[in-house]
Amino acid sequence: IRTHLPDDYTRKRFDFLFRPAGEWQVDIHDVALRSAQTRVPGLDWRAAEPALAVARQFSASDLTGVDSVPRGLYRLLVLAQSDSTRFRSKMERMRTQAPESFEAVTALLAGYQQAVTWYQAVMRFLLTERWFGDPRPRSVVDLAGTVWEIPSSLVPEIRPHLFGYPEGMPVAAVFSSLLDRLIVPQNQTAVRWLARHKSEGLRRVIERIEEPVGGAPVLELGAWRYDLSTIGKEARRSRGGFLEAEDVVLIDPSYMPLLALGTLLHEWHHIVHAHARLSAHVYEGSSGVTVVQSNLFLVEGLAEFAADQVMQEIARRYPVMALGEAEKLAEMAATRPTDAHLLGFLLIRTLADTLPQKGAVQRLLAQADDDPSVLLVLDTSVASLVHPYRDAPDLAVGTARRHVVIPEVTFTIEDEVPFVEATRIVGPERPRLSPPEPPS
């Protein structure tokens, strides 16, 4: 990659990230060790091994010896975020039972904090800088915009998130536009408050509105069953958030950057697709706003297919960069052949081979991704594809679809704390989907 960089500015930026002292650093473990060595000259991984053994940070599946130290340290970093009480207990055990090694662990953990910041900058570089292409250098954003037929302005923020394993997650800001439709100021005080705090302040307040009753209330309407919920509860339940203010891709920094680019593209396309389907799958009525969930197999398959389209272009010059996604799909094929990512990818790739027009898959699924049978009506070539298999046995894969109602709430605000005055449950006028059943 460095050999083909187009200019000195890009090369200096590349070297700042990957070769700051003339030595390669290609993942957060490299960066963490070098950062720690600036505080403790001569420090190496072995110095942390006794303390990590005391804290039981190694598992039976780990590599033996010093090779397992980076993984043990990374688990400790994740624990600090997910369970601070256990983290402090482990740190105290290391401090008292292996004090010299504990100092090494402390220095390395500080290095990992710096490495997480490095990771965000590296993934941004790989996405937005013009490091790819010949003869005219392009960025991955340029390439994706062409392949996906989207404006290059639709680029998400990249934010490291400690899932604890290589993983990505999209946070799409598509529903933030609904706030104006959902919130009705009932007096001048409310109007002035909104003008002063804007939608960001309002979002913080409404996420703090609690459920009117405890437990897990359920609304039964004939054959339909709805969970009663709140905006805050839905935001906490989904790692992708709810009514978010900006598009973000969350990605675990333990995923080596060159292998994580495919995952980044996959999650980014979820956001692109969410924006494309907004007008077709959000319905307004007298009872409020109804949002219809995507079909899991088609939306995951489309994201896999879209990422693969871009990665094929990159892999022609840099084959190793496609290894991460290829390994993931191979593992699914061997152990989970009906996983939505794999099976969905095969379905979408077959569909794309049938459609003569470039980009037709994206446009069709923006209209039909919650009800695949709509595809048969939207495009005659899809109907001809399916026809020979009309007598074949179905492959039935059960999936869960939640039906949720968020009640209408009248509230006042004091010191950015909501006080509920009244709650009214408004049942949906006419559900658009039939009661959930295992789809074929």
Image (cartoon, rainbow, N blue to C red):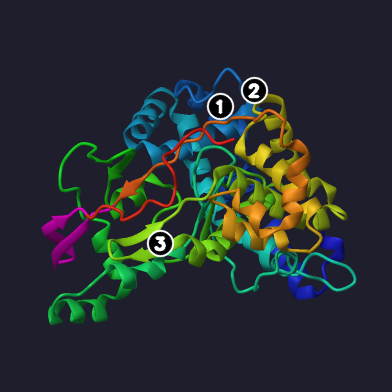
Mark 3, residue position: 244
Q: Label 1 amino acid? A: Glu
Residue drawn at 62 percent across, 28 percent down: 68
Label at residue 65: 2
Residue on which the image places disc 1: 49
The magenta span reads 406-425
Point out residue 88 in the picture as x, y percentages from the top left corner. Answer: 34, 34
Instruction: Give the secondary structure at mark 2.
Output: helix
Depicted 408 relative to depicted 200: above or below: above
The rendered magenta stretch, by its main secondary structure, is classed as strand
Q: Quadrant of the N terminus?
A: bottom right
Q: Amino acid at mark 3?
A: Glu
Of circles 3 and 1, which is in front? Answer: 3
Disc 3 crowd rating (10 Å Cα; few below 14, some 14-19, many 20+) is some
Which residue occupies 57% across, 52% down? Answer: 369
Mark 3 and mark 2 in contact? Answer it, CB < 8 Å: no
Q: Are marks 2 and 1 in contact (CB under 8 Å)?
A: yes
SS label for mark 3: loop
**Lower sequence index among marks 2 and 1:** 1
> How much space separates mark 2 and mark 1, taking CA atoms?
8 Å
Vertical relation: 78 (above or below) 153:
above
**What residue is at 65 percent from the left and 30 percent from the top?**
394
Report crowding for label 2: few under 14, some 14 to 19, many 20 or more residues within 10 A (C-alpha): few
